[in-house]
Amino acid sequence: MMLSIIALFMLIGMTVSLLKNKISPIVAFIIFPFGAVSGLVLFTDTFMSLGDKTHQITEIINWATNGVKLTMNNAILFMFSIIYFGIMNEKGLFDPVINFLVKYSGKNKILIYISTALIALVGQLDGATATTYLVTIPVM
């Protein structure tokens, strides 16, 4: 339970710092997992009385390596999409479509909702959710 809470706070901290542009994505993916080290210490201290400490540490290392193997591709895709779509957004690639949708929707709440969905649809064309966030949230 405590490990889940630590992981939740780590993810919240990473998300907030990335959305507020307080930290670079590459630095965030390097620094925030060190918070998991405190979870590792907490886990081994809590369960030290249950058995062999060495066995528990090797088990945690196996969990960590399997987790990294599963999530490394997504982390690399996320970092690439932030840089790529950040450049495209800065150069104004999405501006004509977004300006048209915002001008067309005006102050009508239903049309704003539909425009947001259409902008998210354009952002989701590459299949990465990070792109959708990067294109839709700053605009709307």
Image (cartoon, grey):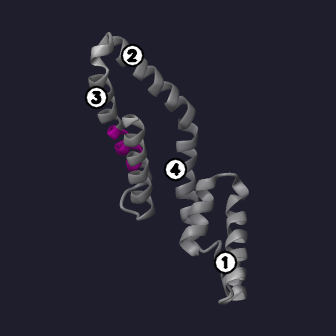
First-in-chain label (2 vs 3) = 3
Q: Nearer the viewer, mark 1 or mark 3?
A: 3
Residue sitting nearer the eye, 77 or 42: 42
The circle on residue 41 is: 3
- Residue picked out by circle 2: 58
Category of crowding for the residue at label 1, using alpha-carbon neighbours closer than 10 angstroms: few (below 14), some (14–19), many (at least 20): many
The kind of secondary structure the magenta stretch mainly shows is helix
Q: Is residue 53 above or below residue 40?
A: above
In magenta segment, residue 125 = no
Q: Amino acid at mark 4?
A: Met
Rounded to the nearest angstrom, the CA distance separating label 1 from label 3 is: 48 Å
Residue sitting nearer the eye, 88 or 79: 79
Magenta residues, as a range?
Answer: 27-35
The quadrant in which the C terminus is found is bottom right
First-in-chain label (4 vs 1) = 4
Residue 121 in the figure: left or right of residue 80 = right
Q: Nearer the viewer, mark 4 or mark 2?
A: 2
The circle on residue 98 is: 1
Q: Is residue 77 above or below residue 20?
A: above
- Residue picked out by circle 4: 79
Q: Is residue 115 above or below residue 8?
A: below
Where does the image place residue 55, in percent across and percent down from the top left?
Answer: 37, 12
Where does the image place residue 84, in percent across and percent down from the top left?
Answer: 57, 58
Rounded to the nearest angstrom, the CA distance separating label 4 from label 1 is: 24 Å
